[in-house]
Image (cartoon, grey):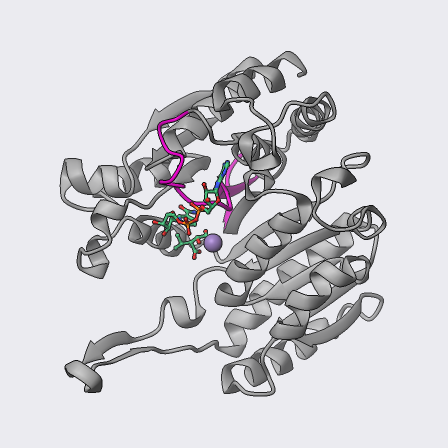
Protein backbone atom coordinates (compact mmCIF):
# COMPACT_ATOMS: atom_id res chain seq x y z
CA UNK A 1 0.00 0.00 0.00
CA UNK A 2 2.00 2.93 -1.34
CA UNK A 3 1.04 6.44 -0.28
CA UNK A 4 2.61 9.67 -1.50
CA UNK A 5 2.67 12.26 1.29
CA UNK A 6 2.80 15.84 0.00
CA UNK A 7 2.66 18.25 2.98
CA UNK A 8 3.11 21.54 1.08
CA UNK A 9 3.11 24.96 2.73
CA UNK A 10 1.97 26.84 5.84
CA UNK A 11 -0.03 24.56 8.14
CA UNK A 12 0.15 21.78 5.51
CA UNK A 13 3.18 20.07 7.14
CA UNK A 14 1.70 20.47 10.64
CA UNK A 15 -1.66 18.87 9.87
CA UNK A 16 -0.13 16.21 7.60
CA UNK A 17 2.31 15.13 10.33
CA UNK A 18 -0.58 14.44 12.72
CA UNK A 19 -2.61 12.65 10.05
CA UNK A 20 0.36 10.40 9.20
CA UNK A 21 0.84 9.57 12.88
CA UNK A 22 -2.83 8.52 13.08
CA UNK A 23 -2.41 6.39 9.95
CA UNK A 24 0.75 4.76 11.34
CA UNK A 25 -0.96 4.07 14.66
CA UNK A 26 -3.31 1.68 12.82
CA UNK A 27 -0.28 -0.53 12.13
CA UNK A 28 -1.51 -1.65 8.73
CA UNK A 29 0.69 -4.27 7.10
CA UNK A 30 2.65 -3.32 3.98
CA UNK A 31 2.26 0.44 4.26
CA UNK A 32 5.00 2.44 2.51
CA UNK A 33 5.08 6.24 2.57
CA UNK A 34 6.93 8.41 0.05
CA UNK A 35 7.53 12.14 0.58
CA UNK A 36 7.38 14.81 -2.10
CA UNK A 37 7.65 18.60 -2.37
CA UNK A 38 4.68 20.63 -3.62
CA UNK A 39 3.69 24.28 -3.64
CA UNK A 40 5.79 27.23 -2.48
CA UNK A 41 8.35 24.96 -0.80
CA UNK A 42 8.82 23.10 -4.10
CA UNK A 43 9.21 26.40 -5.95
CA UNK A 44 11.87 27.49 -3.46
CA UNK A 45 13.74 24.16 -3.66
CA UNK A 46 13.27 23.20 -7.30
CA UNK A 47 12.07 26.35 -9.10
CA UNK A 48 8.61 24.96 -9.80
CA UNK A 49 5.50 24.24 -7.69
CA UNK A 50 4.98 20.72 -9.06
CA UNK A 51 8.37 19.13 -9.82
CA UNK A 52 8.42 16.18 -12.22
CA UNK A 53 9.82 14.00 -9.45
CA UNK A 54 6.79 14.69 -7.24
CA UNK A 55 4.41 13.90 -10.07
CA UNK A 56 6.26 10.64 -10.74
CA UNK A 57 6.04 9.65 -7.07
CA UNK A 58 2.30 10.47 -6.98
CA UNK A 59 1.65 8.42 -10.13
CA UNK A 60 3.56 5.42 -8.78
CA UNK A 61 1.51 5.27 -5.57
CA UNK A 62 -1.96 3.89 -4.76
CA UNK A 63 -3.08 7.13 -3.08
CA UNK A 64 -1.86 10.63 -2.30
CA UNK A 65 -2.18 12.48 1.00
CA UNK A 66 -1.99 16.22 0.35
CA UNK A 67 -1.65 18.94 3.01
CA UNK A 68 -2.13 22.43 1.60
CA UNK A 69 -0.30 24.84 -0.69
CA UNK A 70 -0.12 28.61 -0.79
CA UNK A 71 2.52 31.09 0.27
CA UNK A 72 2.09 34.88 0.37
CA UNK A 73 5.74 35.20 -0.78
CA UNK A 74 4.72 33.59 -4.06
CA UNK A 75 1.58 35.62 -4.82
CA UNK A 76 3.44 37.97 -7.19
CA UNK A 77 4.96 35.17 -9.29
CA UNK A 78 3.73 34.37 -12.78
CA UNK A 79 0.66 32.20 -12.46
CA UNK A 80 2.35 29.02 -13.68
CA UNK A 81 4.89 29.30 -10.85
CA UNK A 82 2.41 29.88 -8.05
CA UNK A 83 1.97 27.19 -5.37
CA UNK A 84 -1.71 26.62 -6.24
CA UNK A 85 -0.61 25.28 -9.64
CA UNK A 86 0.67 22.19 -7.83
CA UNK A 87 -2.75 21.10 -6.73
CA UNK A 88 -4.40 22.02 -10.03
CA UNK A 89 -1.63 20.19 -11.90
CA UNK A 90 -1.96 17.06 -9.77
CA UNK A 91 -5.74 16.97 -10.22
CA UNK A 92 -5.40 17.34 -13.98
CA UNK A 93 -2.40 15.03 -14.47
CA UNK A 94 -3.88 12.32 -12.28
CA UNK A 95 -7.32 12.55 -13.92
CA UNK A 96 -9.04 13.30 -10.61
CA UNK A 97 -12.25 14.82 -11.95
CA UNK A 98 -14.50 14.05 -8.97
CA UNK A 99 -14.08 15.81 -5.63
CA UNK A 100 -16.14 14.44 -2.73
CA UNK A 101 -16.54 16.85 0.17
CA UNK A 102 -18.72 15.52 3.00
CA UNK A 103 -20.15 18.09 5.42
CA UNK A 104 -21.87 16.54 8.39
CA UNK A 105 -22.63 17.72 11.89
CA UNK A 106 -21.67 14.90 14.26
CA UNK A 107 -24.51 13.74 16.50
CA UNK A 108 -24.36 15.54 19.81
CA UNK A 109 -21.98 18.18 18.45
CA UNK A 110 -24.64 20.54 17.11
CA UNK A 111 -23.35 23.23 19.46
CA UNK A 112 -20.16 23.51 17.34
CA UNK A 113 -22.27 24.89 14.50
CA UNK A 114 -23.22 28.55 14.35
CA UNK A 115 -26.65 27.38 13.18
CA UNK A 116 -29.51 26.78 15.60
CA UNK A 117 -29.18 23.18 16.92
CA UNK A 118 -32.45 21.99 15.36
CA UNK A 119 -31.20 23.15 11.94
CA UNK A 120 -27.60 22.03 12.46
CA UNK A 121 -28.52 18.46 13.34
CA UNK A 122 -30.04 17.85 9.91
CA UNK A 123 -26.88 18.93 8.08
CA UNK A 124 -25.49 15.86 6.29
CA UNK A 125 -24.45 16.79 2.77
CA UNK A 126 -22.04 15.26 0.28
CA UNK A 127 -20.81 17.86 -2.18
CA UNK A 128 -19.76 16.23 -5.45
CA UNK A 129 -17.65 18.86 -7.15
CA UNK A 130 -16.31 18.57 -10.70
CA UNK A 131 -12.56 19.14 -10.43
CA UNK A 132 -10.77 19.29 -13.77
CA UNK A 133 -12.90 21.65 -15.86
CA UNK A 134 -14.87 24.90 -15.66
CA UNK A 135 -13.41 28.39 -15.45
CA UNK A 136 -10.38 26.94 -13.63
CA UNK A 137 -8.95 25.30 -16.74
CA UNK A 138 -10.28 27.43 -19.61
CA UNK A 139 -8.34 29.89 -21.71
CA UNK A 140 -7.28 32.82 -19.52
CA UNK A 141 -5.22 35.92 -19.82
CA UNK A 142 -4.82 39.66 -19.53
CA UNK A 143 -4.36 42.44 -22.05
CA UNK A 144 -4.13 46.23 -22.12
CA UNK A 145 -3.08 48.70 -19.50
CA UNK A 146 -4.55 51.19 -17.07
CA UNK A 147 -8.34 51.43 -17.23
CA UNK A 148 -8.26 49.29 -20.36
CA UNK A 149 -6.48 46.45 -18.57
CA UNK A 150 -8.75 43.44 -18.94
CA UNK A 151 -8.58 39.92 -17.57
CA UNK A 152 -10.55 36.88 -18.71
CA UNK A 153 -11.10 33.27 -17.76
CA UNK A 154 -13.18 31.14 -20.05
CA UNK A 155 -15.88 29.06 -18.39
CA UNK A 156 -16.96 25.93 -20.23
CA UNK A 157 -18.24 22.42 -19.72
CA UNK A 158 -18.83 19.75 -22.31
CA UNK A 159 -21.81 17.42 -21.95
CA UNK A 160 -19.33 14.55 -21.60
CA UNK A 161 -17.56 16.18 -18.64
CA UNK A 162 -20.92 16.80 -16.97
CA UNK A 163 -22.16 13.27 -17.64
CA UNK A 164 -19.20 11.60 -15.93
CA UNK A 165 -19.40 13.76 -12.79
CA UNK A 166 -23.20 13.38 -12.70
CA UNK A 167 -22.77 9.59 -12.69
CA UNK A 168 -20.46 9.92 -9.68
CA UNK A 169 -23.15 11.98 -7.92
CA UNK A 170 -25.88 9.42 -8.61
CA UNK A 171 -23.65 6.52 -7.54
CA UNK A 172 -22.68 8.44 -4.40
CA UNK A 173 -26.31 9.13 -3.57
CA UNK A 174 -27.11 5.42 -3.86
CA UNK A 175 -24.12 4.42 -1.72
CA UNK A 176 -25.08 6.86 1.04
CA UNK A 177 -28.38 5.11 1.30
CA UNK A 178 -30.19 7.72 3.41
CA UNK A 179 -31.76 10.43 1.26
CA UNK A 180 -31.92 9.33 -2.37
CA UNK A 181 -31.70 12.93 -3.48
CA UNK A 182 -29.36 14.85 -5.80
CA UNK A 183 -29.51 18.64 -6.09
CA UNK A 184 -27.63 19.95 -9.11
CA UNK A 185 -26.42 23.49 -8.53
CA UNK A 186 -25.79 25.86 -11.43
CA UNK A 187 -26.48 29.36 -12.74
CA UNK A 188 -28.56 28.37 -15.75
CA UNK A 189 -30.58 31.60 -15.57
CA UNK A 190 -27.48 33.47 -16.77
CA UNK A 191 -24.76 31.12 -18.04
CA UNK A 192 -24.71 29.04 -21.24
CA UNK A 193 -22.23 26.72 -19.52
CA UNK A 194 -24.91 26.03 -16.93
CA UNK A 195 -27.57 25.32 -19.56
CA UNK A 196 -25.35 22.60 -21.01
CA UNK A 197 -24.70 21.42 -17.45
CA UNK A 198 -28.40 21.23 -16.56
CA UNK A 199 -29.41 19.40 -19.74
CA UNK A 200 -26.56 16.89 -19.40
CA UNK A 201 -27.42 16.23 -15.74
CA UNK A 202 -31.05 15.56 -16.75
CA UNK A 203 -29.89 13.08 -19.39
CA UNK A 204 -27.53 11.36 -16.94
CA UNK A 205 -30.41 11.00 -14.47
CA UNK A 206 -32.49 8.83 -16.80
CA UNK A 207 -31.12 5.48 -15.55
CA UNK A 208 -31.83 6.60 -11.95
CA UNK A 209 -35.59 7.27 -11.81
CA UNK A 210 -35.71 6.44 -8.09
CA UNK A 211 -33.24 9.21 -7.21
CA UNK A 212 -34.98 12.51 -6.71
CA UNK A 213 -33.21 15.10 -8.88
CA UNK A 214 -33.72 18.83 -8.54
CA UNK A 215 -31.91 21.88 -9.90
CA UNK A 216 -31.08 25.00 -7.94
CA UNK A 217 -29.33 28.25 -8.75
CA UNK A 218 -26.09 28.71 -6.86
CA UNK A 219 -27.07 31.91 -5.08
CA UNK A 220 -30.19 30.26 -3.70
CA UNK A 221 -28.18 27.13 -2.82
CA UNK A 222 -25.78 29.18 -0.67
CA UNK A 223 -28.77 30.52 1.22
CA UNK A 224 -30.59 27.17 1.48
CA UNK A 225 -27.54 25.26 2.81
CA UNK A 226 -27.60 27.28 5.99
CA UNK A 227 -31.32 27.91 6.31
CA UNK A 228 -32.68 24.47 5.41
CA UNK A 229 -29.87 21.89 5.08
CA UNK A 230 -32.27 18.99 5.65
CA UNK A 231 -33.41 19.21 2.02
CA UNK A 232 -29.95 18.18 0.73
CA UNK A 233 -28.39 14.78 0.29
CA UNK A 234 -25.87 15.00 -2.55
CA UNK A 235 -25.08 18.39 -4.08
CA UNK A 236 -23.70 18.05 -7.60
CA UNK A 237 -21.92 21.12 -8.91
CA UNK A 238 -19.08 22.53 -10.99
CA UNK A 239 -15.55 23.37 -10.00
CA UNK A 240 -15.98 27.03 -8.99
CA UNK A 241 -19.38 26.77 -7.30
CA UNK A 242 -18.24 23.63 -5.46
CA UNK A 243 -15.16 25.41 -4.15
CA UNK A 244 -17.25 28.21 -2.69
CA UNK A 245 -20.13 26.10 -1.37
CA UNK A 246 -17.79 23.67 0.40
CA UNK A 247 -16.16 26.44 2.47
CA UNK A 248 -19.67 27.65 3.28
CA UNK A 249 -20.77 24.16 4.32
CA UNK A 250 -17.68 23.78 6.52
CA UNK A 251 -18.59 26.92 8.43
CA UNK A 252 -22.08 25.52 8.94
CA UNK A 253 -20.54 22.36 10.47
CA UNK A 254 -18.38 24.48 12.76
CA UNK A 255 -14.99 25.00 11.17
CA UNK A 256 -13.07 24.61 7.95
CA UNK A 257 -10.63 22.60 10.05
CA UNK A 258 -13.12 19.72 10.10
CA UNK A 259 -13.83 19.05 6.42
CA UNK A 260 -11.95 16.34 4.53
CA UNK A 261 -12.07 15.58 0.84
CA UNK A 262 -11.38 12.84 -1.65
CA UNK A 263 -10.49 13.45 -5.29
CA UNK A 264 -10.94 10.45 -7.53
CA UNK A 265 -11.06 9.52 -11.19
CA UNK A 266 -11.33 6.29 -13.08
CA UNK A 267 -8.02 4.62 -12.24
CA UNK A 268 -8.27 1.46 -10.16
CA UNK A 269 -5.37 -0.09 -8.24
CA UNK A 270 -5.14 -3.56 -6.74
CA UNK A 271 -6.64 -2.14 -3.52
CA UNK A 272 -9.38 0.21 -4.71
CA UNK A 273 -9.79 3.54 -6.48
CA UNK A 274 -6.70 5.71 -6.86
CA UNK A 275 -7.29 9.06 -5.18
CA UNK A 276 -5.83 12.18 -3.61
CA UNK A 277 -6.97 13.11 -0.11
CA UNK A 278 -6.77 16.55 1.43
CA UNK A 279 -8.47 18.90 3.85
CA UNK A 280 -10.61 21.49 2.04
CA UNK A 281 -8.77 24.34 3.75
CA UNK A 282 -5.63 26.08 2.60
CA UNK A 283 -2.20 26.78 4.06
CA UNK A 284 -3.59 29.31 6.59
CA UNK A 285 -0.51 31.58 6.65
CA UNK A 286 -2.08 33.57 9.51
CA UNK A 287 -1.60 30.66 11.95
CA UNK A 288 1.22 28.67 10.29
CA UNK A 289 4.13 27.52 12.43
CA UNK A 290 2.31 28.22 15.70
CA UNK A 291 0.84 24.78 16.43
CA UNK A 292 -2.62 26.34 16.13
CA UNK A 293 -4.06 24.40 13.20
CA UNK A 294 -6.80 21.84 13.60
CA UNK A 295 -5.52 18.61 11.98
CA UNK A 296 -8.92 16.88 12.10
CA UNK A 297 -9.81 17.63 8.47
CA UNK A 298 -6.57 15.94 7.34
CA UNK A 299 -7.06 13.05 9.77
CA UNK A 300 -10.57 12.56 8.36
CA UNK A 301 -9.07 12.68 4.86
CA UNK A 302 -6.97 9.65 5.84
CA UNK A 303 -10.23 7.91 6.77
CA UNK A 304 -11.60 8.70 3.31
CA UNK A 305 -8.38 7.32 1.81
CA UNK A 306 -8.71 4.04 3.68
CA UNK A 307 -12.33 3.76 2.56
CA UNK A 308 -11.99 4.66 -1.12
CA UNK A 309 -8.43 3.69 -2.03
CA UNK A 310 -7.81 0.70 0.25
CA UNK A 311 -11.23 -0.83 0.92
CA UNK A 312 -10.64 -0.56 4.66
CA UNK A 313 -14.04 0.58 5.89
CA UNK A 314 -13.48 -0.66 9.45
CA UNK A 315 -10.30 1.40 9.91
CA UNK A 316 -11.96 4.43 8.28
CA UNK A 317 -14.80 4.25 10.79
CA UNK A 318 -12.32 3.82 13.64
CA UNK A 319 -10.64 7.09 12.70
CA UNK A 320 -13.96 8.91 12.29
CA UNK A 321 -15.18 7.67 15.67
CA UNK A 322 -11.89 8.69 17.32
CA UNK A 323 -12.24 12.25 15.94
CA UNK A 324 -15.87 12.38 17.02
CA UNK A 325 -14.96 11.17 20.51
CA UNK A 326 -12.13 13.70 20.83
CA UNK A 327 -14.55 16.49 19.94
CA UNK A 328 -17.19 15.13 22.32
CA UNK A 329 -14.53 15.07 25.07
CA UNK A 330 -13.92 18.79 24.53
CA UNK A 331 -10.72 18.59 22.48
CA UNK A 332 -10.91 21.78 20.38
CA UNK A 333 -8.52 23.95 18.46
CA UNK A 334 -8.76 27.73 18.31
CA UNK A 335 -10.98 27.38 15.22
CA UNK A 336 -13.65 25.88 17.49
CA UNK A 337 -13.11 28.27 20.37
CA UNK A 338 -10.76 25.89 22.23
CA UNK A 339 -7.08 26.07 23.11
CA UNK A 340 -5.70 22.66 22.09
CA UNK A 341 -2.71 22.73 19.76
CA UNK A 342 -2.32 20.82 16.52
CA UNK A 343 -0.05 18.17 18.03
CA UNK A 344 -2.24 17.81 21.12
CA UNK A 345 -5.32 17.25 18.96
CA UNK A 346 -3.48 14.64 16.90
CA UNK A 347 -2.40 12.84 20.07
CA UNK A 348 -5.93 12.99 21.48
CA UNK A 349 -7.30 11.36 18.34
CA UNK A 350 -4.66 8.59 18.45
CA UNK A 351 -5.43 7.88 22.09
CA UNK A 352 -9.06 7.31 21.10
CA UNK A 353 -8.38 5.00 18.16
P1 LIG B 1 -7.37 29.06 4.27
O1 LIG B 1 -8.29 27.90 4.19
O2 LIG B 1 -5.93 28.77 4.26
O3 LIG B 1 -7.69 29.87 5.61
C1 LIG B 1 -8.94 30.53 5.84
C2 LIG B 1 -9.11 30.80 7.34
O4 LIG B 1 -9.37 29.56 8.00
C3 LIG B 1 -7.87 31.39 8.01
O5 LIG B 1 -8.27 32.28 9.00
C4 LIG B 1 -7.19 30.17 8.62
O6 LIG B 1 -6.41 30.47 9.75
C5 LIG B 1 -8.38 29.30 8.98
N1 LIG B 1 -8.04 27.87 8.89
C6 LIG B 1 -7.87 27.14 7.75
N2 LIG B 1 -7.56 25.88 8.05
C7 LIG B 1 -7.53 25.79 9.40
C8 LIG B 1 -7.27 24.73 10.30
N3 LIG B 1 -6.97 23.49 9.90
N4 LIG B 1 -7.33 24.99 11.62
C9 LIG B 1 -7.65 26.22 12.07
N5 LIG B 1 -7.91 27.26 11.27
C10 LIG B 1 -7.85 27.04 9.93
O7 LIG B 1 -7.78 30.05 3.10
P2 LIG B 1 -7.08 31.43 2.60
O8 LIG B 1 -6.60 32.20 3.76
O9 LIG B 1 -8.04 32.03 1.66
O10 LIG B 1 -5.84 30.95 1.73
C11 LIG B 1 -4.50 30.84 2.22
C12 LIG B 1 -3.63 30.19 1.17
O11 LIG B 1 -4.01 28.82 0.99
C13 LIG B 1 -3.73 30.83 -0.22
O12 LIG B 1 -2.45 30.83 -0.79
C14 LIG B 1 -4.66 29.92 -0.97
O13 LIG B 1 -4.47 29.96 -2.36
C15 LIG B 1 -4.29 28.59 -0.39
N6 LIG B 1 -5.34 27.55 -0.46
C16 LIG B 1 -4.89 26.28 -0.70
C17 LIG B 1 -5.79 25.22 -0.65
C18 LIG B 1 -5.28 23.84 -0.86
O14 LIG B 1 -4.06 23.64 -0.90
N7 LIG B 1 -6.12 22.84 -1.03
C19 LIG B 1 -7.13 25.46 -0.35
C20 LIG B 1 -7.54 26.77 -0.10
C21 LIG B 1 -6.64 27.81 -0.15
C1 LIG C 1 -9.54 24.00 -2.73
C2 LIG C 1 -8.67 25.19 -3.02
C3 LIG C 1 -8.15 25.14 -4.45
C4 LIG C 1 -9.34 25.23 -5.39
C5 LIG C 1 -7.11 26.23 -4.81
C6 LIG C 1 -5.97 26.28 -3.85
C7 LIG C 1 -6.60 26.03 -6.20
O1 LIG C 1 -9.36 26.38 -2.76
O2 LIG C 1 -9.07 22.86 -2.90
O3 LIG C 1 -10.67 24.17 -2.30
O4 LIG C 1 -9.81 26.33 -5.69
O5 LIG C 1 -9.79 24.17 -5.82
MN1 LIG D 1 -11.27 26.08 -1.72
Tell me which residue sits at (61%, 16%) in the image.
348
Q: Is residue 312 magenta?
A: no
Task: Depth check: give the residue in front, 278 or 56.
Answer: 278
Q: Residue 240: x and y, percent?
A: 48, 66
Residue in the picture at 30% in, 32% down: 36
Magenta stretch prevailing secondary structure: loop
Bounds of the magenta span?
266-290
Establish if 46 lies above or below 189.
above
**Up-down: is 103 above or below 154?**
above
Question: Any magenta on residue 270?
Answer: yes
Number of on-image labels: 0
Q: Determine whether 222 is above or below 102 in the image.
A: below
Q: Residue 132 falls in which quadrant of the image?
A: bottom left
The percent position of residue 100, horizontal first and vertical second, equals 59, 51
Residue 219 visible at all? yes
* Corner quadrant of residue 59: top left
Picture coordinates of residue 90 (x, y %)?
A: 36, 49
> Could you tell whether 220 is left or right of 290 in the image?
right
Which quadrant holds residue 347? top right
In the rendered structure, the answer to whether residue 110 lies left or right of residue 291 reads right
Give 60 or 150, whichever is nearer the viewer: 150
- Is residue 26 shown to the viewer in this render? no
Residue ID at (66%, 16%): 353
Amino acid sequence: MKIAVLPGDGIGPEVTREAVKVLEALDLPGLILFDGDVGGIAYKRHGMPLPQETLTIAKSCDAVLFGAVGDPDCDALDRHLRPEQAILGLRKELGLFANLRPAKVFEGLEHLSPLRPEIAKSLDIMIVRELTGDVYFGDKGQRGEGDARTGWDMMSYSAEEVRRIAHVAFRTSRARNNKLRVTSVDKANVLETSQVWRDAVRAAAEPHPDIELSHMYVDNAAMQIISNPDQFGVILTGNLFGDILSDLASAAVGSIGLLPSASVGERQTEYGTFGMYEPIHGSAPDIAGQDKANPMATVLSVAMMLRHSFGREAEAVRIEKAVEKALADGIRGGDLGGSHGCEEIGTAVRERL
